[in-house]
Image (spheres, rainbow, N blue to C red):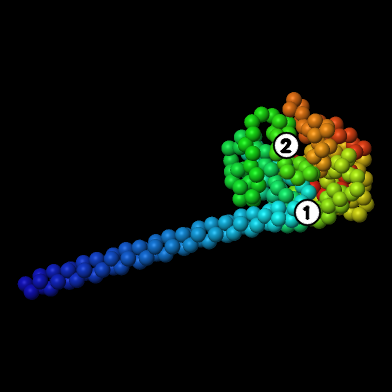
């Protein structure tokens, strides 16, 4: 008969032991969750700070370029439409131009993007213009707002290879280049010396294309009437209107995935 109370005590001890284990497990999970939440929060905070730092650094470069007004020559104009991903490498390649004092501003002429194109432009310190109408009208409006004496048109996704700033500086500093325009050489993968020479020759003799970019003095742009609003491909049509004999192909290359 004495076994009953002992058994009840054993059961009670077991239940208490199990309950204690549950509480410890719950407490451990709670601590683990808090630690995970803290790490996630710390990671997000770190990522945000890094993102903010990069944005600040790029804007600082743009500010420095603006400060050296004596050397500022170019307003870069980039037409966009849902170009969030393509815009990033293009802007990254332009940083060297800003730090060298060659670029005074980057104007993004947007045609109603639904992605984060505006966010990318803002982080990079660009002037973002939300414009309606066809591509030619947007390009013309952006050129009218540009403050520098030279315009450089770039398509999103086009990446300039260093040291492109040296070639551009030499071109715009010539004594009488204002009746001419320039484009970059179309880039390709690694090539032999012979293929490189042939590529350069073809680029100099063949028709210029919009993905090569376009550098033109603002007075000449205005004299030619700017981009056409009615043309199906206003970039290519404007290059044809300049005429190939007035367009110099720079040695610096521009790579475009399209």
Q: Residue at x 70, y 39 (%)?
A: 145
Q: Is residue 215 visible?
A: yes
Image-based side of 65 in relation to 243, left or right: left
Label 2 packing within 10 angstroms: few (<14), some (14-19), many (20+): few
Find the distance from the CA under tag 2 to the CA under tag 1: 21 Å
Q: Residue at x 32, y 63 (%)?
A: 26
Q: Residue at x 28, y 66 (%)?
A: 23
**Rendered view: 92 above or below 151:** below
Occupied quadrant, residue 85: top right
Q: Which residue in the protein does label 2 denote?
A: 144
SS at circle 1: helix
Q: Is residue 236 visible?
A: no
- Quadrant of image for the N terminus: bottom left
Image-based side of 109 in relation to 219, left or right: left
| N-terminal label among 2 and 1 | 1
Image-based side of 206 in relation to 237, left or right: right
- Quadrant of image for the C terminus: top right
Q: How many marks?
A: 2
Q: Position of residue 168 (x, y in %)?
A: 83, 50
Q: Position of residue 15 (x, y in %)?
A: 21, 67
Occupied quadrant, residue 83: top right
SS at circle 2: helix
Q: Which residue in the protein does label 1 denote?
A: 70
| Mark drawn on residue 200 | none
**Rendered view: 164 above or below 36:** above
Q: Nearer the viewer, residue 220 or 208?
A: 220
Q: Position of residue 121 (x, y in %)?
A: 63, 46
Q: Nearer the viewer, residue 177 or 50?
A: 177
Image-based side of 193 in relation to 32, left or right: right
Occupied quadrant, residue 179: top right
Task: Check the image and name the residue furthest to the front.
Answer: 70
């Amino acid at each position: 008969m004495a076994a009953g109370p002992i058994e009840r005590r054993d059961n009670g001890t077991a239940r208490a032991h199990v309950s204690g284990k549950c509480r410890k497990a719950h407490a451990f999970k709670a601590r683990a969750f808090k630690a995970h939440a803290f790490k996630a929060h710390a990671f997000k905070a770190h990522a945000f700070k890094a993102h903010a730092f990069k944005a600040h650094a790029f804007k600082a470069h743009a500010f420095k370029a603006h400060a050296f007004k004596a050397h500022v020559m170019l307003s870069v104009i980039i037409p966009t439409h849902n170009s969030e991903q393509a815009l990033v490498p293009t802007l990254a390649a332009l940083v060297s131009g800003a730090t060298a004092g060659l670029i005074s501003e980057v104007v993004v002429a947007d045609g109603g993007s639904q992605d984060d194109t505006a966010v990318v432009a803002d982080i990079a310190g660009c002037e973002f213009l939300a414009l309606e109408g066809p591509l030619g009208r947007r390009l013309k409006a952006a050129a009218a707002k540009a403050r520098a004496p030279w315009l450089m048109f770039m398509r999103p996704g086009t990446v300039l290879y260093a040291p492109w700033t040296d070639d551009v500086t030499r071109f715009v500093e010539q004594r009488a280049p204002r009746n001419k325009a320039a484009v970059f050489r179309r880039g390709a993968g690694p090539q032999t010396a012979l293929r490189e020479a042939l590529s350069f020759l073809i680029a100099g003799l063949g028709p210029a294309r919009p993905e090569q970019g376009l550098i033109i003095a603002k007075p000449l742009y205005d004299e030619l009437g700017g981009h056409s609003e009615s043309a199906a491909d206003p970039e290519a049509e404007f290059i044809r209107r300049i005429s190939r004999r007035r367009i110099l192909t720079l040695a610096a290359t521009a790579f475009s995935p399209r």
